[in-house]
Amino acid sequence: MPTSIRTIIAAALITFAAGASTFAADSKTCIVSGDTFGGDKGPPVSVTYKGRTIMLCCKSCIRKFNANPEKYLGAANNTQAGQ
């Protein structure tokens, strides 16, 4: 794997692990698709919304998230509250 890709993956994982400014329903799944991070889709991708970094499983989920972010954040917040 080229160094630049490893650097991007490491930066994404560090950002994801940082916690306070990063949001996901849990540390393993995308709030848009419900798919597990990594695997066939590759490393997670991020989008910034209202100052928070949101981790998603792939680029197509960025489009879906941006179309209705409150829908996905609301559903994820409800999931977290039930845990």
Image (spheres, rainbow, N blue to C red):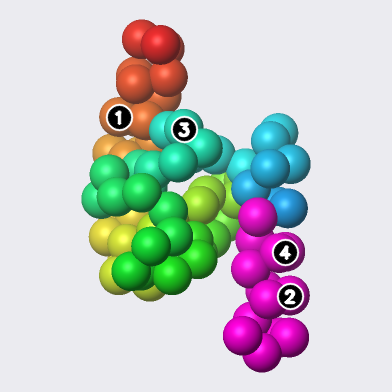
Quadrant (top left/top right/bottom left/bottom right) for the N terminus? bottom right
In terms of sequence position, does the residue under pointer 4 or pointer 3 come before the other? 4
Q: Earlier in the sequence, mark 1 or mark 2?
A: 2
Judged by its main secondary structure, the magenta piece is: helix
- Residue labelled with disc 2: 7
Above or below 23: residue 10 = below
- Between 56 and 1, which is closer to the camera in this rendering? 1
Residue at image position (36%, 49%) is 36
Q: Which residues are magenta?
A: 1-13
Tally the numbered discs: 4
In magenta segment, residue 5: yes
- N-term-proximal mark, 3 vs 1: 3
Distance in Å between CA atoms under marks 3 and 1: 12 Å
Give the number of the mark in front: 3 or 1.
3
- Label 2 environment density (alpha carbons within 10 Å; few <14, some 14–19, many ≥20): few
- Expressed as whole percent of the image width and height from the top left, the position of residue 39 reads 38, 62
- Which residue position holds label 4? 11
Q: Is residue 26 left or right of residue 40?
A: right
- In the picture of the structure, the residue carrying the numbered disc 1 is 75
Q: In the rendered structure, which disc, 4 or 1, sits on the residue that comes first in sequence?
A: 4
- Which one is nearer the viewer's eye here, 50 or 61? 61
Task: Tell me whether the residue at label 3 lies in contact with that at label 2, contact meaning CB atoms closer than 8 angstroms.
Answer: no
> Label 3 is placed on what type of residue?
Asp
- Mark 4–mark 2 contact, CB under 8 Å? yes
What's the amino acid at mark 2?
Answer: Thr
Tell me the distance, in whole angstroms, between the alpha carbons under discs 4 and 1: 27 Å
